[in-house]
Image (tube, rainbow, N blue to C red):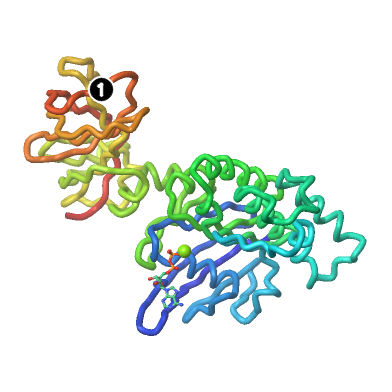
């Protein structure tokens, strides 16, 4: 396994810039996810790492060595794409063995390597079948077996679970993570699905319009978003205009017209100077309570429920307090508050983050 580094990578297609000055260090053995909406440049980055596309500027390193001029088949990568196209007229074993064909693997070793890869994806007995005799999820596991049988230095996965239906996708998430930790291969995973990214990654690289917005652990990008884009792409957030009044102890005081002064943990308010600031209040952290409920230690405002979007275990409310509409996503035991109910909107300052700017 190897580290992967992007240094000042720019990719232009004609006059259109798909990737702007990307800098990224992926340590050996890490599972790193490129996360962002469709068209933000995830696949373009992955294809440059793979050697399927040349960067316009900058350097790509694998294992600390520049690989810009090294062709794809000499980079020792395992690649799985969304449409995991197995060869229909080859058996599963032949499909998995395909990756070994152009490597100097002795014939006697091929069968045992193929079997080990099939064991790893927990399909030990399907080697003699043809792909069409397997389900979508099983075919995707075979595509993964074909990618890892070569013992790649880096595994590149481009939305490999997107074609699967929701339940299977969640099972495969766990499965893929298990396999990756077992073989310890450096993995670059691409998805537009934030819950997939949060569940699987050591580090998440959040991208928007060809730019890297933030790199951090799932907890870091979720709890301490570096931009409004990140705060809204990973879940939903209320962004309130305010004023940073300065640091006191381990908190930064952010004053908002709606909630007064909110002491935001300094660890979630980096780059904040006195002056205009934005308070980031995640929708899941804003709780609706009946008026008069115990709100000790919480910051509160009276509000009216305007819209109720029932989602089973959770409910998404739009509430109004003064001129402001806020969004709250709450777990519910029984019935949600009906539209028109007067409630208390409450949250804890420690759950907030803050961003610089007006
Ligand atoms: N070969 C190409 N020629 C021109 N534009 C391209 C090409 N490949 C990708 N793009 C553009 O670059 C941007 C990023 O594409 P892509 O990396 O595929 O995004 P993502 O994988 O995040 O959905 C998009 O606007 C896309 O239309
Ligand atoms: Mg893509």
On the image, the x and y values in percent for residue 311 come to 33, 33
Q: Nearer the viewer, residue 159 or 181?
A: 159
Q: In the displayed structure, does residue 102 sit left or right of residue 81?
A: right
Does residue 50 appear to the left or right of 73 in the view shown?
Answer: left
Name the image quarter holding residue 47: bottom right
Along the horizontal axis of the image, is 178 left or right of 90?
Answer: left
Residue at point 77% right, 59% down? 91
Q: Position of residue 124 (x, y in %)?
A: 78, 45
Question: Which residue is found at the position 71% from the left and 59% from the top?
Answer: 146
Nearer-the-camera pick, 94 or 51: 94
Q: Is residue 64 above or below residue 313?
A: below
Q: Residue furthest right?
A: 108
Q: Residue at x 89, y 60 (%)?
A: 109
Q: Secondary structure at mark 1?
A: loop
Q: Nearer the viewer, residue 213 or 253?
A: 213
Q: Is residue 248 above or below residue 38?
A: above
Residue 196: where, in percent of width, then height? 48, 46
State which quarter of the image contains the C terminus: bottom left
Count up the numbered dots: 1
Task: Report the front residue among 157 and 281.
Answer: 157
Residue 336 to residue 174: above or below? above
User: Residue shown at 29%/33% (left/top)?
Assistant: 329
Q: Mark 1 and ligand 1: say if the CB distance to the nearest ligand atom is below 8 Å.
A: no
Which quadrant of the rendered structure holds the N terminus? bottom right
**What residue would you read off at disc 1?**
297
Q: Is residue 18 above or below residue 152?
A: below
Question: Measured from the top left, where is residue 284 in percent x and y?
Answer: 31, 34
């Amino acid at each position: 396994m190897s580290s992967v580094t992007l240094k000042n990578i720019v990719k232009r297609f004609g006059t259109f810039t798909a990737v702007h000055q990307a800098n990224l260090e992926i340590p050996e053995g890490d599972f790193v996810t490129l996360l962002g909406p469709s068209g933000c440049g995830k696949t373009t980055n992955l294809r440059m790492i793979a050697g399927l596309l040349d960067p316009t500027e900058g350097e790509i390193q694998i294992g600390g060595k520049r690989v810009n001029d090294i062709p794809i088949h000499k980079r020792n990568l395992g690649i799985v794409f969304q449409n995991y196209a197995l060869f229909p007229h080859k058996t599963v074993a032949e499909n998995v063995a395909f990756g070994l064909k152009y490597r100097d693997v002795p014939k006697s070793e091929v069968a045992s390597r193929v079997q080990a890869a099939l064991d790893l994806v927990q399909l030990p007995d399907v080697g003699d079948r043809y792909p069409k005799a397997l389900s979508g999820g099983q075919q995707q596991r075979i595509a993964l077996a074909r990618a890892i049988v070569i013992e790649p230095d880096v595994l590149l996965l481009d939305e490999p679970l997107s074609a699967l239906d929701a339940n299977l996708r969640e099972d495969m998430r766990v499965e893929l993570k298990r396999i990756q930790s077992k073989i310890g291969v450096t993995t670059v995973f691409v998805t537009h699905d934030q819950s997939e990214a949060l569940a699987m990654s050591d580090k998440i690289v959040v991208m928007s319009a060809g730019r890297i917005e933030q790199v951090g652990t799932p907890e870091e990008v979720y709890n301490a978003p570096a931009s409004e884009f990140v705060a809204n792409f990973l879940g939903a957030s209320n962004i309130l205009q305010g004023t940073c009044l300065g640091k006191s102890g381990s908190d930064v005081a952010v004053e908002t017209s709606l909630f007064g002064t909110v002491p935001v943990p300094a660890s979630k308010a980096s780059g904040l100077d006195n002056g205009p600031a934005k308070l980031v209040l995640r929708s899941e952290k804003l709780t609706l309570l009946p008026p008069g409920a115990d709100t000790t230690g919480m910051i509160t405002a009276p509000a009216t429920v305007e819209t109720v979007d029932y989602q089973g275990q959770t409910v998404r409310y739009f509430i109004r307090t003064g001129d402001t509409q806020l969004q709250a996503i709450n777990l519910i035991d029984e019935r949600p508050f009906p539209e028109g109910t007067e409630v208390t909107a409450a949250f804890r300052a420690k759950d907030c983050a803050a961003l610089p700017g007006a």
